[in-house]
C-alpha cells in the first residue's frame, strides 16, 4: 500500500473499532438490571451514554472514506466493470454473511438464552422464517446494513453524478428530515441519513481533501469554534448533520497531521485493522452476541464479588473489541488459505486468486 494512503486506511481501522465498540455496548449493558457494586449501575449508564455520544464520529467518516476511495469508478469506469468489482463483491458478502449471521444467532440464542424473546427485534438475524429474513434484508433491517448501503450508495452516486450539485443539497435535507420523519425500518433510516457523507466523498472527495490539508486551524480557530458550538446545539435538536461533518474534518485533520509527523507503517495496528474491515465487520456481530449472553447469564445466576463485577463492567468493551478484531483477521486468513477467500469474495474472484 502506498505510504500516502496509509493514514486513510488507519481511519478505516478506527471506524471499524468504533462499530465493534458500539455493538459490544448495546448488546450488553442495557440488558443488565441487578448489580452488586454501588457504582456498577452508574458505570453501565456511562458506557451507554458514551456510546451514544460517539455516533457522529462513527459512520459519517466511515462512509466519507468509502466514497472517496471509489471516486474513479463513478466517472472513469464503465457500468459493466463497476458492477462486477464494486457491487457484485459486496452483494456476495452481504448475502452470504446475512444467512450465516441469521443461522448463527438463532442457534446461539436457543443455546444460551432459550427464554429470550426476540420476536420484537426487527433484525434479519432474528427472523422466524425465510420470508421474514428476505424482507428484513431488502429493507436494510440487518446488522450488515453498512454493506447494503455501500451497494445502494454506489449505484445512486454513479447514476446521478451529472446532477451532483443539486443532489448534494437534496441529500443534506434528506439527512435532516429522516430524523423527524423516519421510515418504518431502522436500517433504512440509517442508510438514508448517511448517504450525504458517501456522496461527498465520491463526488467532491479530492477537492475536500485538498481543502482539509490546507486549512489552518490556528488561523481560523474562532470560526471553527463557532461552527462547533452551532453543530453541537443542532445535535441536541436531533440534527446531527453538522456535527458529523465537523467530525469528518476533525478526524481526517488529526490523522493527516499525525501521519505527516510520524509516517504510518503498514504493520501498525490501525492499518492492519483497516485492511480487514469487512472481515471484522461481518464476524463481530456473532461474537458480541455470544459474549453478551454468556456474561448476562453469569450476572443473573452467580453470586459474585462486587469488585470483580465492577472490573468486568469497566473493561468489557475493550476486551470484546480485541477479541473481535483478532477473530475477524483470523477468519480472513483462514478464508484465504483454506477456502480461496470464498467467505469474503464471490466464487469467480476467489477462484481467480488461487
Image: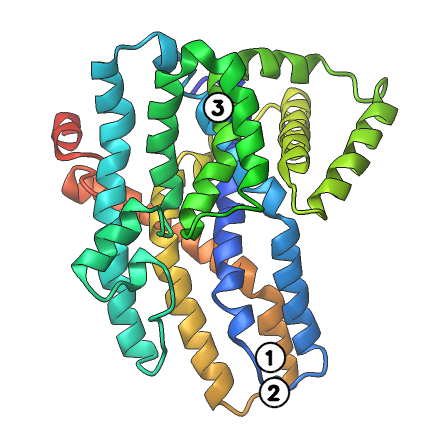
Q: Residue at x 24, y 70 (%)?
A: 107
x and y percent of residue 332 in the render?
A: 29, 43
The local secondary structure at tag 2 comes to loop
Residue 305's disc number: 2
Q: Earlier in the sequence, mark 1 or mark 3?
A: 3
The local secondary structure at tag 1 comes to helix
Q: Quadrant of the C terminus?
A: top left
Outermost residue to the bottom: 303
User: Would you place residue 87 above or below residue 44 in this image?
Assistant: above
Give the distance between the C-alpha atoms of the residues marked 3 and 2, in whole angstroms: 51 Å
User: Would you place residue 326 above or below residue 250 in this image?
Assistant: below
Residue 199's disc number: 3
User: Would you place residue 180 above or below residue 126 in this image?
Assistant: above
Q: Residue at x 27, y 42 (%)?
A: 94
Give the distance between the C-alpha atoms of the residues marked 1 and 3, in whole angstroms: 45 Å
Q: Are marks 1 and 3 in contact (CB under 8 Å)?
A: no
According to the image, what is the colour scheme of the structure? rainbow
Give the side of residue 36 with respect to residue 115, left or right. right
Amino acid at each position: 500500500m502506498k505510504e500516502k494512503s496509509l493514514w486513510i486506511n488507519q481511519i478505516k481501522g478506527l471506524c471499524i473499532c468504533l462499530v465493534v465498540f458500539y455493538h459490544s455496548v448495546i448488546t450488553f449493558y442495557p440488558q443488565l438490571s441487578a448489580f452488586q457494586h454501588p457504582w456498577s449501575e452508574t458505570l453501565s449508564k456511562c458506557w451507554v451514554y458514551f456510546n451514544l455520544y460517539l455516533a457522529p464520529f462513527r459512520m459519517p467518516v466511515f462512509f466519507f472514506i468509502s466514497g472517496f476511495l471509489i471516486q474513479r469508478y463513478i466517472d472513469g469506469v464503465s457500468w459493466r466493470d463497476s458492477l462486477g468489482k464494486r457491487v457484485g463483491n459486496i452483494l456476495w458478502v452481504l448475502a452470504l454473511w446475512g444467512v450465516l449471521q441469521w443461522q448463527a444467532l438463532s442457534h446461539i440464542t436457543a443455546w444460551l438464552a432459550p427464554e429470550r424473546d426476540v420476536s420484537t427485534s426487527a433484525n434479519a438475524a432474528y427472523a422466524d422464517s425465510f420470508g421474514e429474513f428476505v424482507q428484513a434484508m431488502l429493507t436494510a433491517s440487518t446488522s450488515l446494513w453498512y454493506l447494503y448501503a455501500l451497494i445502494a450508495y454506489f449505484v445512486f452516486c454513479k447514476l446521478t453524478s451529472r446532477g451532483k450539485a443539486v443532489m448534494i443539497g437534496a441529500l443534506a435535507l434528506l439527512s435532516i428530515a429522516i430524523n423527524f420523519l423516519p421510515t418504518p425500518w431502522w436500517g433504512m433510516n440509517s442508510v438514508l441519513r448517511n448517504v450525504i457523507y458517501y456522496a461527498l466523498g465520491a463526488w467532491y472527495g479530492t477537492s475536500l481533501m485538498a481543502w482539509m490539508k490546507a486549512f489552518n486551524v490556528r488561523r481560523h480557530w474562532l470560526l471553527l469554534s463557532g461552527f462547533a458550538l452551532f453543530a453541537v446545539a443542532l445535535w441536541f435538536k436531533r440534527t446531527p448533520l453538522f456535527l458529523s461533518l465537523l467530525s469528518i474534518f476533525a478526524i481526517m485533520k488529526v490523522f493527516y497531521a499525525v501521519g505527516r509527523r510520524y509516517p504510518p507503517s503498514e504493520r501498525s495496528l490501525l492499518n492492519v485493522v483497516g485492511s480487514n474491515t469487512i472481515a471484522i465487520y461481518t464476524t463481530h456481530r456473532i461474537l458480541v452476541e455470544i459474549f453478551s449472553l454468556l456474561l448476562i447469564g453469569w450476572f443473573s445466576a452467580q453470586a459474585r464479588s462486587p469488585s470483580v463485577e465492577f472490573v468486568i463492567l469497566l473493561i468489557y468493551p475493550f476486551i470484546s473489541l480485541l477479541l473481535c478484531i483478532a477473530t475477524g483477521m483470523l477468519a480472513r486468513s483462514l478464508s484465504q488459505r483454506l477456502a480461496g477467500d470464498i467467505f469474503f469474495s464471490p466464487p469467480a474472484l476467489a477462484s481467480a486468486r488461487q
